[in-house]
Amino acid sequence: MIFGEIPLEEAEGAVNAHTHRLEGRVVRKGQILDAAAIAALRAAGHTRIVAAKLEPGDVGENEAAERLAAALEAPHLRRTRAATGRVNFAAERAGLFVVDRAGVDAINAVHESLTLGTLPDATPVAPRDMVATVKVIPFSVPGALLEEACRYARANGAPFRLHPFRPLRAGLVLTELPGMKESVLENTIAATEARIAGFGGSLLAPRRSAHAEAPIAAALRGLLDEGAQIVMVAGASAVVDRRDVAPAAIVRLGGEIRHFGMPVDPGNLICVGRIGEIPALVLPGCAGSPKPNGIDFVLQRLYAGLDVGPQEIMRLGVGGLLKDISARPLPRAKASPVDPAPARRPAIAAVVLAAGQSSRMAPYNKLLLPDRSGKPMIARVVDNLLASAARPIVVVLGHQREEVRAALAGRPVRFVVAEDYASGLSASLRAGVAALPEDVAGAVICLGDMPLITARVIERLIDAYDPDEGRLIVVPTHQNRQGNPILWDRRFFAEMQALRGDAGARFLLSRHAEAVAEVEVETDAVLRDFDTVESLASLPERFRPALPTNTG
């Protein structure tokens, strides 16, 4: 790749390096310079431009990111489409994300232009959590280097995996000694049940037993007969040896003790065994605490279907110091690696503008027209949003507000009324933005008359949003034409609140061109709204309303 300042007459086909705001046009960073862009630059007085020219064999940043990400595909992970040379991987299910560091290092060692970043090894994740990202650093990569990285990934498999949590039934035996407080047992039950529920499992009715080998074995046998898929013993006295009464009870049932102790504190005195194929644990004294401890390390692996034997336990020392100490700058609740805050997607809301008078479709209200299945247009728009990750969904009401509210009955949306809706579109936009909670990072502004916008399109916009990379406004395009809906970072809400009249927020795109990221989509749905009777005829037949004869 050749990078630097070049004359405009040599710039066609090059990649623009910096955004240029021109009269009536914006030439964006990363844009392929065509004849029209060059003419606009020349008309604005430019004679040279900083750009990148791909050489034979070079692969553009987005194609390179797509190809490397495709070679890294793994089950239960969803990848986004490339934008500015980046592809993100997100969890499709709750589970344990595990990483082979050597494999990640090998890919990153190919060349500085190709990078792969992941969450730490053995991180519990929820659905939609981002777990890994491929980022191509420059505008292009030499094809030979890209193929080297892809070849490694194909030959060795992705160096990361998501192991979904399984809804296993767990059994708990609590041993008792004279003088024990009932609150101790209750705390242990509550903490254990919360841990199991966090993995999607369930806890059978706990059994109590004297603190002796035979009664513990009998209680364990009862739980196994009930269908327990994991059994645990919380002892009235901490286990001090692999031949102590609770481990001995496991052996008495034909089981084995695989490992005693672990390099994790709290949680040192755990005993890991099995009875046949059923994991059997003797829990340490910290079992009654809800704070992270060694139990979490073991249970998250077992619920993810991973083996927990001597080798796995002995590798837990790095990061295994969880106990609060005065020298530690953060308390355990914030510093523990057991339950880190993974790279979750920012909270993105949706605002549906449904307050207009539908004057161009008089005497009908387009939003209330039912399609062939009987579903009103506004209900289809909202249902598509509900199938996406956008939350909360705020619907702005105005004209025929009660009828629109009734059309959305039972759906988990929030309503806000734009009392001055008749003054124009900006009134609806102001009301919708003002109703958004403080914790949302941004919002997709949706028109109520675009029923062909699917959840997939909304997800594409959310995936492309990245404040860290300056992608603060995400606009869908089709065949290079900008459409709707548009995702806006919350930093633009104040400017929206200042709008008046029938103007929407679209004019802000040119004011903040450097923050705009365009996402090309396959469908022209992003260009189509339906605000006249004639336009309804172009809807797919199943969405086409049969206009009522009684207009009321």
Image (tube, rainbow, N blue to C red):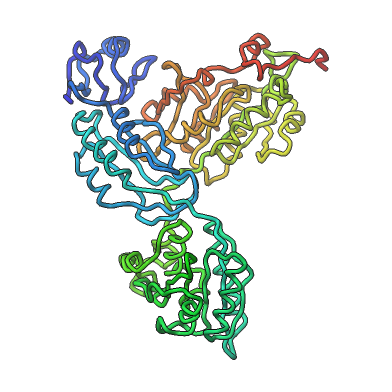
Residue 539 position within the rendered picture, expressed as x and y whole percent measured from the top left = 62, 15
Residue furthest bottom as drawn:
178
Residue at the image position 46 percent from the left and 52 percent from the top: 95
Residue 114 position within the rendered picture, expressed as x and y whole percent measured from the top left = 25, 38
Q: In the image, is 420 to the left or to the right of 317?
A: right
* Closer to us: 256 or 131: 256
* Closer to us: 75 or 23: 75
Depicted 177 relative to depicted 222: above or below: below
Depicted 45 relative to depicted 261: above or below: above
Residue furthest front as drawn:
254
Q: In the image, is 305 to the left or to the right of 143?
A: right
Q: Quadrant of the N terminus?
A: top left
Residue 132 position within the rendered picture, expressed as x and y whole percent measured from the top left = 36, 44
Depicted 14 relative to depicted 144: above or below: above
Residue at the image position 54 percent from the left and 45 percent from the top: 438
Residue at the image position 40 percent from the left and 83 percent from the top: 241
* Closer to us: 233 or 440: 233
Residue 157 position within the rendered picture, expressed as x and y whole percent measured from the top left = 31, 43
* Closer to us: 459 or 309: 309
Mark count: 0
Q: Quadrant of the C terminus?
A: top right
Which picture quadrant has residue 90? top left
Residue at the image position 74 percent from the left and 24 percent from the top: 374
Which picture quadrant has residue 217? bottom right
